[in-house]
Image (cartoon, rainbow, N blue to C red):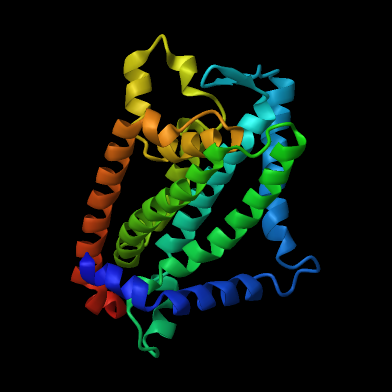
Amino acid sequence: MFKLIKEQIEYFNLARRLSLYELKSSNKNNYLGMLWELLNPLTQILIYWFVFGTLRNRAPVEVNGEEIPFLLWLIVGFLVWIFFYQASIQASKSIYSRLRMLSKMNFPMSVIPNIPIFSKMYIHIGMIIIAFFIYQFSGYTVTIYIIQFFYFVICLYALTFAFGLIMSTLSTIVRDVHLFLNSTLRMGLYVSGVLWPLTILNDFPKVQAFLKFNPLIYVVEGYRYAFLGRGWYIVEHWKYGLYFWALVLILLIIGSVLHMRFRRNFIDYL
């Protein structure tokens, strides 16, 4: 694991440059270019708001004792999920889709899953900036609680990289893993507290407790506390934070072991 982390630090600039190059090249034939990377999630947010907030007449959601309009409650949670979903899917196929290129280049394969993750992080930051202005004009001005946002960005990246490292190795060995992941991750939108608050399940404490094993909920709620200025989520839920980082560490160890064990043989799975 330490060797793999060292490789990420050493080749950080390379991964960052390649990610930006891929982001530009994938949109070079579009008239609006990379603007589509922002328009797609914005369109999805509006669709979910229209369906759940308008047609289903979803009431304001309570966050730490205060009612928040559904759209403002939805935005940052959805941005967390869409980043994790897209980055995980792209990271899972990152190695086997680049094996021919990798056979001609001299840098660690462990850097490859970071390339699509960094690409999606550029988009994520762009969407966060847009969300920031939406919250300002909606009356939720910046508070001291916004500081914890930077911590939760690190949480989101660490979780995505650890998970993507595992999936990229397994998908290279067995292609069906990527297809299975693409199908199952879609359910994450409905079990990560993105479209509906977990407080709905207060009458079913066991189900609620089970869903909280999903580490993405920790990040989603942290983002909301930061942008809505509702308190220090890090402090109020420090036990949940310990669980989150313990799980990320376990995933990173598993991913490191799998990657180091099989990466010399990746070319055999081409």
Position of the C terminus, as image quadrant, is bottom left
Do we see residue 153 in this rendering? Answer: yes
Position of the N terminus, as image quadrant, is bottom left
Whether 169 is drawn above or below 204: the answer is: below
Q: Residue at x 51, y 37 (%)?
A: 189
69 left or right of 270 in image: right
**Residue furthest to the right:** 31
Whether 11 is drawn above or below 30: the answer is: below
Q: Residue 214 location, x and y as percent?
A: 37, 36
Q: Residue at x 42, y 12 (%)?
A: 202
Could you say which is closer to the camera, residue 97 or residue 71?
71
Do we see residue 270 in this rendering? Answer: no
Could you say which is closer to the camera, residue 149 or residue 98?
149
Q: Residue at x 36, y 63 (%)?
A: 168
Could you say which is closer to the camera, residue 210 or residue 245?
245
- Give residue 126's quadrant in the image: bottom right
Whether 253 is drawn above or below 223: the answer is: below
Whether 214 is drawn above or below 166: the answer is: above
- Give residue 167's quadrant in the image: bottom left
Q: Residue at x 79, y 65 (%)?
A: 32
- Give residue 66's quadrant in the image: top right
189 left or right of 57 in image: left
Q: Residue 239 location, x and y as percent?
A: 29, 32
